């Protein structure tokens, strides 16, 4: 852990929340040098790249670009070239010279102390434990805008008291890690303010060589199973993760981690990744276009996805295939089967196989509860026999690929719970299991220059990091095991 970062975090504990935020931001700006955390496994390594991003959901490659390019300009050092001095509360009093003006007289240092709300605690109990008067409590409750929120205190939450010479100057009610209410003494009682924190985003990097399984390698590279799953989903159109993974396959990714007070609280997006499967390297870049839509693209701007997923439901077996000469099980007459039946338990979610607009959502005699989706290029997909149609799915509504549109059932003419799925091009039924699926829409021409710029930076970053990490992994294994 970077020494400067830790010092600033320690300092931050002594300041009100907003100061802590300023410090956190300052520390991440200063400490752009890479923090290297060796993994347990010699083949799997990850690093963290502290960044100054402030919001997980809006962070994009544009921000990453800024950080990565500026990271290159900052010397690799744990000492800040220009330490940012916190505001008055943190300034030391002058100790020499003729000028005896002491800033502390004008801006006295508040001593902050934190106490946990215990089971069965009341506010007045906490106040008397803290040797604060009932009168002070009443002033906070009566004069401040958020006084009533203090009635909601629950065990496990915290209250932070700020005193000067024993007198209460401020109080923070910490509802959870991200939300608190701050009360500040004024001449006319207390004023209050709701403070909502945004986690800090840091960029991290992982690389691994697969020896046993994908998830095993992911875990050794410091990824949660969920992150490994997300990585696999990016490449799911090009790599068969069930049958096709081999020992020696490698992956390499840059992703976001969310931090609060120096502690990791979750993951953000995977920003770029490569996956080498049986000698072929696939590359994916996360890009948010000018309309705010985010997706993964190959370095030349093609979508990583197809416009349709082959199978819109997790099924147990295919109970009936596309067959134009089938004898119908109920009517015992020759009736073509113009779709595929996927047997699955009642209630299994059914997903839109591609982006489109709902053309019909309702009941039809043989199909029971059915949804038709109109897609570009005159393609229509049909999802029949649903136990129920998902909430909000009705004619004219736009749906995204993978969005749940309903649930498996056996309404209409069905002998058991299954999804009857059809794929129609220009009104002609095609076999959903074999029809050639079109590629998803590539990146618009207008986006290409911005996209290319970010792609270059990201891929260089990936390449450089994986090179460094693998080299150091080999060094480590030489030293420690041979
Ligand atoms: Zn069917």
Image (cartoon, rainbow, N blue to C red):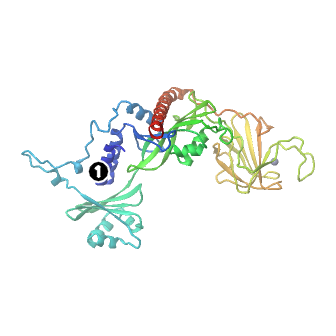
Decide if residue 124 is on the left or right side of residue 353.
left
Residue 198 seen in render: no
Residue 88 location in percent, x, y?
22, 49
Residue 142 location in percent, x, y?
32, 68
Along the line of sight, which residue is nearer the eye, 83 or 144?
83
Along the line of sight, which residue is nearer the eye, 214 or 331?
214
Decide if residue 370 is on the left or right side of residue 285.
right
User: Residue lying furthest front in this view?
Assistant: 482
Residue 164 location in percent, x, y?
21, 61
Q: What residue sits 73% from the left and 50% below the top? A: 315
Q: Secondary structure at mark 1?
A: helix
Residue 307 location in percent, x, y?
67, 36
- Residue under pointer 1: 11
Task: Please tell me whether residue 93 is drawn above or below residue 247 in the rendered image.
Answer: below
Task: Please tell me whether residue 444 is drawn above or below residue 226 in the rendered image.
Answer: above
Image quadrant holding the N terminus, namely top left
């Amino acid at each position: 852990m970077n020494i400067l970062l830790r010092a600033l975090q320690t300092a931050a504990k002594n300041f009100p929340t907003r100061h802590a935020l300023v410090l956190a931001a300052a520390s991440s700006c200063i400490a752009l040098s890479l923090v290297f955390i060796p993994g347990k496994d010699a083949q799997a390594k990850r690093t963290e790249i502290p960044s100054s991003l402030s919001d997980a959901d809006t962070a994009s490659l544009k921000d990453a670009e800024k950080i990565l390019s500026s990271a290159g300009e900052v010397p690799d050092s744990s000492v800040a070239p220009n330490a940012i001095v916190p505001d008055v509360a943190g300034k030391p009093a002058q100790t020499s010279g003729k000028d005896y003006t002491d800033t502390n007289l004008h801006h006295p240092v508040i001593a902050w102390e934190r106490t946990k709300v215990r089971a069965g605690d009341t506010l007045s109990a906490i106040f008397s434990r803290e040797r604060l008067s009932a009168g002070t409590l009443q002033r906070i409750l009566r004069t401040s805008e958020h006084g009533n929120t203090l009635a909601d205190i629950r065990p496990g939450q915290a209250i932070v008291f700020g005193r000067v010479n024993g007198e209460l100057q401020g109080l923070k009610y910490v509802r959870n890690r991200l939300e608190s209410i701050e009360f500040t003494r004024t001449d006319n009682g207390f004023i209050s303010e709701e403070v909502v924190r945004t986690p800090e985003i840091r960029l991290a990097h992982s690389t691994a060589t697969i020896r046993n399984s994908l998830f095993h390698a992911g875990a050794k590279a410091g990824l949660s199973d969920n992150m490994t799953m997300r990585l696999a989903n990016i490449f799911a159109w090009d790599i068969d993760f069930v049958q096709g993974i081999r020992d020696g396959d490698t992956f390499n990714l840059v992703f976001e981690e969310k931090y609060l007070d120096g502690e990791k609280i979750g993951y953000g997006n995977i920003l770029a990744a490569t996956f080498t499967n049986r000698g072929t390297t696939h590359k994916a870049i996360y890009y948010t276009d000018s309309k705010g839509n985010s997706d993964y693209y190959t370095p030349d701007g093609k979508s990583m996805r197809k416009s349709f997923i082959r199978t819109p439901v997790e099924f147990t077996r295919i109970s009936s295939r596309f067959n134009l000469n089938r004898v119908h099980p109920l009517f015992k007459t020759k009736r073509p089967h113009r779709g595929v039946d996927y047997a699955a338990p009642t209630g299994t979610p059914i997903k839109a196989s591609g982006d489109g607009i709902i053309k019909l959502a309702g009941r039809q005699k043989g199909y029971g509860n059915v949804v038709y989706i109109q897609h570009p290029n005159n393609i229509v997909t049909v999802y029949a026999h649903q136990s129920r149609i998902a909430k909000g799915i009705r004619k004219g509504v736009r749906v995204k690929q993978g969005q749940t549109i309903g649930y498996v059932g056996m309404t209409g003419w069905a002998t058991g719970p299954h999804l009857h799925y059809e794929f129609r091009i220009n009104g002609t039924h095609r076999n959903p299991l074999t029809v050639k699926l079109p590629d998803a829409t590539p990146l618009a021409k207008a986006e290409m220059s911005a996209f290319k710029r970010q792609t270059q930076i990201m891929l260089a970053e990936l390449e450089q990091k994986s090179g460094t990490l693998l080299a150091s992994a080999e060094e480590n294994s030489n030293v420690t095991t041979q």
